[in-house]
Amino acid sequence: MIKKEAKKIDVLFVIPPVLRFMNRSSTNFPLGLGYIVAYLKNKQNIHAEIYNADIYHSPTKLKTFLTSVYILLKTKFLSYSDNVDFAEKWPEYYNIVNDTDNPIWDEVRSILKKTNPKIVGIGSKVVDIPSTIVLAKIVKEILPEAKVVVGGPSAITCSEYLMKNSPIDYLVNGEGEETMMELASFIINNTNNYQIKDIKGIIYRDESNKIIKNPPQLLIQNLDEIPFPERESMFIVEKNNKIKYIDVFGDILTTRGCPFPCRFCAAHEAWGTKKTRFRSIDNIIQELKYLVNTFGQKNFIFWDDLFTIDKNRTMELCQKIIDNKLDIKWLCLVRIDKIDAELLEKMKTAGCYEIQIGIESGNDRILSYIRKGINLEIIRKQISIIRQSGINWRIFLIIGFPTETREEIRDTINLIAEIKPTFVDLSIFCPYPGTDFYYELQKQGQLDKDFMKSDMWYPYITYTGTMNNEEFKKIALEALKYVDKYNYNNAYKKMF
């Protein structure tokens, strides 16, 4: 654990609180912000840090273990469902987030006063928008001269909605490194080399309060030119009001972008392209070595939208991990039609212990409708290959797609018992802005003002058109409960 006090900094990036309002914590390192922090430091010597306001404090390993066992045993023996419990807490977030007297917002005020940044950057997803808006208002309350910059998926796909809120000064509309460097340099150094209208990839208001959208920033083509994420830059606030920098070194990204046209995903709009850009194998190995040798990191998550998009490249990376004797364990996200026995064997030898697969539905009509590009025949064919590999496999499923019926939802749940994955993640359909479904439902007039409350854990709104909200809620909560039982039974077997 890194022990140090927060310094006076130029840019404070904030992860807004969401899960914390439900007595939970975010867990992963924000790679996007980590890359930008490193970029600012290396290119312009601008000092930035990340304040994760979505973690209250880091529990001890013993507490984490005991909590896990407690939940597992409750699920096993007391008909308890962690997913259902989580889903039922979501309305609390929308009720609590606007209470600016909440102690969580008091903590935010304290950090703003202590760090006194010239720029507050907010990394925002769609689900964060209510929290992002409150946070922006608090920044202007505490630091009226500071500029509020919002980036992330919501800045790209919900720009008009966000810019209606006057506390937000700028949006980063696309890939963040180059745009944020130019904007931060302009604000902090008051450079005369260019004017605000010359900074590509931002949205802002002009002197007449008109919203201006500058031309897009060019994507960085050589990803190796981007410095490794500044992983030692993230801090939290503990119960004793002390700042603590936390160790999160296991998150890796080797590509940017996904070429597949799934109708529920906004990756194309978020990345600004349908093409995938790749880091070189040597660059990835260099980062892995750095994390292993510097921090003793042994477990990794490859967060690529599709880790196995290029079989030859994946084979080469795995061979390099083996050749360099990197004794690591890792998991990754794959498509079920982009793996084979040879590849899985190589991945396992290189330390892969789990693959995560977006199957989405157990019904062929729905799979075709959402443009997943697979069918049940492909799924069933590939299952034997996965089982023979001995690698754990987690599947992602979604229920509640537009036009989906009760019977088609039942097909998805029944698929679990048929194919028997190691673990299952079940989500609720949400029309995320930027997706094909979002634009379709918007055109049909089916997105009322409450659609922003939708999220992958929110079972209170249905877009199926085949059942009402109450019917869908009942089906969704039962499905979540079933999946919890399935997962914890498997975890129980593994533990004992």
Image: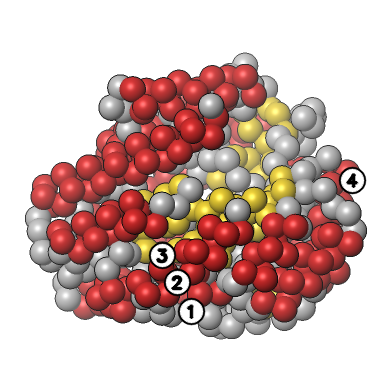
Q: Which mark is residue 260?
A: 1
Contact check, label 3 and label 4, Cβ < 8 Å? no
Density class for disc 2 (Cα within 10 Å; few <14, some 14-19, many ≥20) is few
Contact check, label 2 and label 4, Cβ < 8 Å? no
Circle nearer the viewer, 3 or 4: 3
- Mark 3 vs mark 2, CA separation in Å: 13 Å
Q: Which mark is residue 299?
A: none
Circle nearer the viewer, 1 or 2: 2
Quarter-of-image position of residue 190: bottom right
Q: Which mark is residue 359?
A: 3
Q: Of the residues under marks 3 and 2, which one precedes in the sequence? A: 3
Q: Of the residues under marks 3 and 4, which one precedes in the sequence? A: 4
- Mark 4 vs mark 1, CA separation in Å: 36 Å
Secondary structure of the residue carrying tag 3 is strand
Q: Residue at x 47, y 64 (%)?
A: 383
Circle nearer the viewer, 3 or 2: 2
- Mark 1 vs mark 2, CA separation in Å: 21 Å
